[in-house]
Image: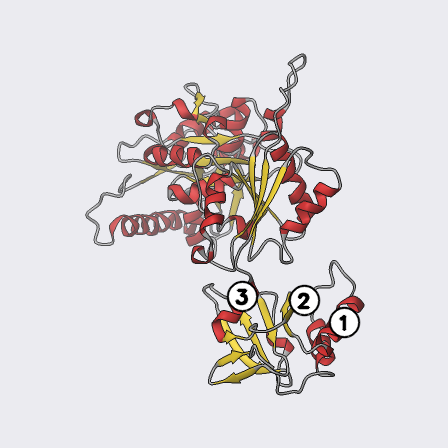
Amino acid sequence: MSVGKLYGVGLGPGDPELMTVKAARLISEASVIAYHCARHGRSIARSVAEPYLREGQIEEKLVYPVTTETTDHPGGYEGAIADFYELSAKRLAEHLDAGRDVVLLCEGDPFFYGSYMYMHERLSGRYEAVVVPGVTSVSAASSVFGRPLVQRDEVLTVLPGTLPAPELARRLADTDAAAVLKLGRTFSSVREAFAEAGKLDEAVYVERATWGEQRIEPLASVDPASVPYFSLALLPSPGYASRQSPGSPPPAPSSGGEVVVVGLGPAGPEWLTPEAAAELSAAEHVVGYGPYVARVPQKAGQQRHASGNRVEADRAREALDLAASGARVAVVSSGDPGVFAMASAVLEQVSAGHGTGVRVRIVPGVTAAQAAASRVGAPLGHDYCVLSLSDRLKPWDIIEKRLDAAGAADLVLALYNPASRTRTTQLADARAVLLRHRSASTPVVVARDVGGPEEDIRITTLGELDPSTVDMRCLLIVGSSRTRAENGIVWTPRSY
């Protein structure tokens, strides 16, 4: 006898008419209809599928043993649920082994926070498993609210409400649009997170979208005690909301705001200066490369604008545009913003005519060179030169000439951006240039992720330096003829 097929069938958000034609056909044809339910026996999934059921089908109720995390199971809630899934899989396997096709009903989409996935994980390796997608609750909420989720190049983030409020706030602040699911008992912390991210007034609450008793309200006005599990918080497309309706007056002009370019130091908060911390706290907007923005402590009402690593000019213009509307904007850089960072990018855009009327200030930070030097002693104790080996913004022949000049001048060098996945030859070439002027025994400090969890400090020599061990997260300090290295300490004397 041939075995049956397992179907994970997405039912959509609740309206039976939003079910796909394929889902309806499979439900009506299957020998076995399985669905999850609570101990009272009622199933939302079955009620949605009911118009397509037929007489004679076997119905398998998969009754959850617990619906909250309160249980006397020795393994706690997770243990009770794991046992339930194992037992449910065995029950379905008996039907499949008998040659009966099984349709497991799933609200929304089976692979989008769907209950079906736990059966798929346990059974798809032994039986043919077919997943039928369904309209998600997020799409349904957007449609009943009547606003686009996202458009053009906006970013949509889908989040579970079970995340801690600070983490939710961070992610909400870093996105254009969002949907937060699994509300119910998490609602208060979710609303707190929207407020912390400065987006509570833009968010909407949608309950049982497309059902007869659906409910749509501003998120800020919802009573937490009235919120069921089948609800979500929606932050729709900001672009759509910003468009003016025909005939509406233009916004009143506002006085120019301020852009403060802030150095975060090389790593965690212990490297942040009090002045920088105060400017970050006072900012209404934080703009910067994603990992650097993530290092800024979240503040209620503050909006965050994270972007990629190679869009400095775009980032600077965005900050200036925000400030031109009267906002106080912090642009963040790792280390010091004036050292191969955002300060020059912002000032370049100001020079090009952007941000008319906007004030620009620079707040310094501890540089990567200073941090690396402190770990080994005082290699920068005398005259030194700072160079970037990246040829993305300047040609290599200029870098080579400057290396040669610094080598001839017997300056200590702090080398930024020594290597990357696509730049694998520059450091070896730089080493060859410096060896024209320095002995092979010249001390070299290779500092990686200073102040971070993967900090690694190595002291080697110019002759023994292996470029293949260096990556983009490293900074190198190459000593002068006067630099000394003894017992793990590197220093350059101040006197000749």
Dot 1 amino acid type = Glu
Dot 3 amino acid type = Gln
Which residue reaches farthest top?
247
The residue shown at (57%, 66%) is 369
Q: Is residue 113 visible?
A: no
Please name the residue that numbered disc 1 is placed on.
400
Disc on res. 432 = none
Depth check: give the residue in front, 92 or 178: 178
Disc on res. 370 = 3
Please name the residue that numbered disc 2 is placed on.
387
Depth check: give the residue in front, 471 or 299: 299
User: Viewer-nearest of labels 3 and 1?
Assistant: 3
The residue shown at (78%, 71%) is 401
Please identify the quadrant where the C terminus is shown: bottom right
Give the image location of residue 52, x and y in percent: 47, 28
Measured in 3D between alpha carbons, the distance from the residue under mark 2 to the one under mark 1, in whole angstroms, is 10 Å
Query: Nearer the N terminus, badge 2 or badge 1?
Result: 2
Dot 2 amino acid type = Leu
